[in-house]
Structure formats: C-alpha cells, structure tokens
Amino acid sequence: MPVATVATRPFEGQKPGTSGLRKKVKTFQQPHYLENFVQSIFDILEGFEGKTLVLGGDGRFHNREAIQTILKMAAANGFGRVLVGQGGILSTPAASCVIRKHAAFGGIILSASHNPGGPDEDFGIKYNATNGGPAPEKLTEAIFARSREITAYRIAEAGPVDLDALGTRALDGMAVEVIDPVADYAELMETLFDFDAIRDLFAGSFRMCFDGMHAVTGPYAHAILEGRLGAPAGTVINGTPLPDFGGGHPDPNLVHAHDLVAAVDAPDGPDFGAASDGDGDRNMVIGKTFFVTPSDSLAVIAANAALAPGYAGALAGIARSMPTSQAPDRVAKALEIPCYETPTGWKFFGNLLDAGRATLCGEESFGTGSAHVREKDGLWAVLFWLNILAKRRQSVAEIVQDHWRTFGRNYYSRHDYEGVDSDAADGVMVHLRGRLSGLSGTRLGRYEVAFADDFAYTDPVDGSITRNQGVRIGFTDGSRIVYRLSGTGTEGATLRVYVERFEPDPDRHDQPTQQALADLITIANDTAEIAARTGRDKPTVIT
Ligand code: VG1
Ligand code: CO
C-alpha cells in the first residue's frame, strides 16, 4: 500500500508541563493538526521500528476518527503492531496496564480527561512511555520543539480499520490487534485485592452506586463490580460511554457527580458511592452524607494497606503532590516510611515508582494510585475502598473519623477561579512571588509564617530540578496556603488556591470545612489580592 508524505507547516503542539495536547474538537478537526502532533511524537521517539504501540481513548467525540488517522500514521512510520481497545476504548490506567503487560514501546491515549466532550467541546491526546506513564518533561519538551519545526508527515493511504470486532488485521504491513479493553486490567485488579471478601460483602446487605458519568469507566465497572464481584445489576449508573458524556461534565466531584450524591444520600440509598472521570484515572468516594477528601482517601488507604493482598508487605513509601494535604505524611511517619512531595502531575511519580521508592501516590485533585501501573487509577481506588470496607465492616464515615482520631484531621479545601483573564492570573502570581522574601517570620492574622517559597522539586532519583511549581506559604502550626495556575484548562486561566489546617483535637473534628478554614481563606484572598486583580469576589468551584 502506498505511503504519502504530506507537506505541512510548523505549529504549536503540547506545551511542556501540561498533561497532553488539549484543544477544542474544532481545532483538532483542522487539516493536518492531529497529524502534525502525532508526527512530532514519532520524529522524537527512537527505535520503535517493528515494535508495539498501544492506542485507545475515552470514547469522546472525534475518538474513532483520530484513531483511524493514528493507525495509518503508525503503519507509515514503521511500527510493527498496534494494540487498540475495542471500539477505540481504553481508560488511561488500562492503557498504562496494557503497555506494561505487553512490553509495548509506548502508547497514545486520546482524552481531555474531565473536560467536557462533544463537537464544540474538548479533545486531547497524550503519549505514554515504555513504563506506562506520562511522557517525562524532557520528552514533552523535545516533542514541543519538534512541532515548531515540522514540515511533513507520513501516512498510509488505506481505508478505515474495523475497530469493533476483536482480532488481528493487517494495515500496510503493520498488525492491528483489536483487544478487549477490560480483560488485562480486570486480571491485574484480581491480583491486588481480596475479591472473595468483596464478593461476600455484596452477598450481604451492603450496596454501592458507581457513577460512570457516561465516560470510559462504565464498561470496566460493569465487568468488574457487577460481573466479577457480583454486585447487583443497577450498581453502575451512567455506564455507557457517550461521545458527549451525556452533556455532562465527567469530573467526579460533589458538583458534577450530582446523580451519585442524590442516590447515596436518599433515605434507603446505598452505603457507598464512587465515580470516575472521562478517562478513568480520577475517583471520588463518598459514604452516606459523607465526602472523603482525596487527600484523606490516600491517607486512609495507606493506613489500611495491609488489608489488601497486593499491599500486605511493607509499603516502600508514599508520594503526594505538593498541594495535596499533609494527611498522608502523618501516616508515613507512623509507618516509618518516607513521604515524598512532588509537583502537580502524575509524571513526577514515575521515577519514584520505577525506582521502588514509593508504593502509593496521590493528588488532591481526585487522583490516587500505586506502583501497579504508572497512571492514577480511579477504579483501583474504588476497589481499594471496597477491600477496606469488606474487611472492616464499618461505614465510610466511621473509618475516616477513626482515622482522624488516630492521626488528627487535616481540614482541606481547594478554591478554583476558572476562566480568569490570563494576564490578571499571571499578575496574581507575579505579585505573590514579589512578596515571598518579605513574608517569612511575619504574622498573617493569628498565623505566623514559617516559610514562603516558590516550590522547586529535585527528583531524588535522577536529580533533575523542576522550578516554579506554585507559591507556598507555610505557617508554624503546619497550616498552609498554596497558589498555582492550572495547566489543563482550554479557556483563559484557572487560578487554584489550596488551604489546609491541622486539627489534633478530636472534639473539634466535626466542623464544616469552609467554616474551619474561614480565617485562612480570608488571609489567602487578601495576600494574593484576588478580588482586586481578577475582578472575582468568589471562586467558581470549591472542593
Ligand atoms: C489538574 C490537577 C492535577 C492533575 C491534572 C491532570 O491539573 O490539578 O493534579 O494531575 O489535572 O489530571 P491542573 O494543572 O489543571 O491543576 V487528568 O484527570 O486531566 O489526567
Ligand atoms: Co483524568
């Protein structure tokens, strides 16, 4: 079959430091746009001739079209085989699992994660490396530089490949193997968790509700929860992936997973609720009228890890992103294992996991995971909770409150200002950086500043340094305020403000979060001059 070399113009690909190239679908539909990015990746990678690429996405609008294009380009560029999820479906953690299990060269995942989907919404693409994890910064920098120089791409002139029937077909000398997107992943989960204990739990009166949010995890949840674990049919809601996610926002938080919250809080509703995002890497877990913050979830999982067969040996360490609360640090201290603080983004956990220094990782943004793959993993976290619930036979609230009694409570909240004017958002950060040197040792309200800095991370494995990862103000009582700008939005800028306060006294563990943090929130707003600089007197989203 002929291969065409198509002339094109340089463009601007994925900015280094962001999670993949995320743009409006309309942008991706422009001639050569997707092709330019894919060729930029292939131009930078070395030694993939005859090797295997993993390919799949979260099923959003434009998924199938993009897969057909990438298949033809992989063939023209010399890959030997592509493993593609049936129907073009692969969750981000499942793609990571397949890359590792089949020793693939790497993978391409089509997703804009929790961003909405549809003809006028977002599309995205990211490259994952041989270890199954997000491309490291060095690689994304090289791919970005290449995108600004690219002049041609190669593509096989072939018709579309059938993505719906399992099995192998040939495309211009390359094998396209359509695989069951769930099988490898479900098999891995069975090795990590006590499926017998969870089956027993479902055999009794325990009920759960899992909200697939019409995104990629529906098929995984149906197969694992209702299939292998025997949860009753109807446990999974919104379980069919739709190109526009049913018009919703596939972001598992209290605002967007409203169907789930309503179901669990109903008088005779289930005992446990969970949801995952567009590409299946995030998770939210809730009990009856009880929300578990992602930071607490990581801490509880770490403290109870011995209950899960895959984690019964000692944990090597815990890693959390810098804005995540310090609740996991307290567990690490009790377990006498290290706790690493990394910049935001899963790629920073990669070296720690590869080197065997960390077993569990987490981010405050509903991301939790472990060394079993190299991505955060929504359903994995839900199964971990089910394993804990099956062994302890207590409610979610009882387990978390018990955790607070043992370790103290880290009150925690994130305030997002979305769609802010980019210059105004940059102005907030410039203003804060300008104030850093003057803050140490001063008082802000009743809090004394212990340190104030712009977070820089030195990777303990390869020594690489990543700077400017967010402004931190730490107080002498362990409270913190953190400011950073989002790297995943597609419109304007999003300013994120993270506030945390430690409360050791068990008699003071039942305050409403925003109330418990009220004075720190005021200090955070005043110090950054948020209202004056952005014109916003309140955040768009509070989690
Ligand atoms: C957000 C989260 C971050 C997460 C990233 C990708 O980034 O804060 O913790 O790693 O999304 O998650 P930002 O730069 O917008 O704050 V996902 O589910 O999109 O892979
Ligand atoms: Co995601």
Image (cartoon, rainbow, N blue to C red):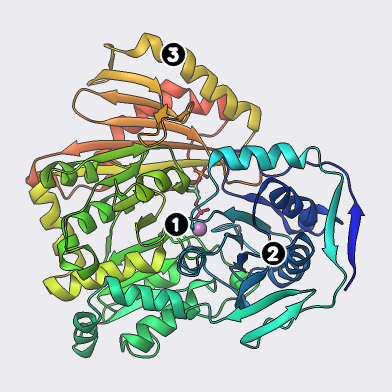
Q: Amino acid at mark 3?
A: Arg
For the residues labelled 2 and 1, say whether their Cβ atoms are less than 8 Å apart.
no
Which residue shows up at 47% across the image and 46% down it?
Answer: 347
Q: Position of residue 414 (x, y in %)?
A: 39, 42
Residue carrying label 2: 79
Which residue shows up at 73% across the image and 64% down it?
Answer: 74
Q: Amino acid at mark 2?
A: Phe
Comes first in the chain, label 3 or label 1:
1
- Compared to residue 231, the image places residue 533 above or below, namely above
Identify the element where label 1 is drawn. Answer: loop
Q: Amino acid at mark 1?
A: Glu
Residue carrying label 1: 375
- Compared to residue 188, the image places residue 32 above or below, namely above
Identify the element where label 2 is drawn. Answer: loop
Direction from residue 57 to residue 170 in the image, left or right: right
State which mark lies toward you, 2 or 1.
2
Queried on whether the Cβ of the residue with tag 1 lies below 8 angstroms from ligand 1, the answer reads yes
Residue carrying label 3: 435
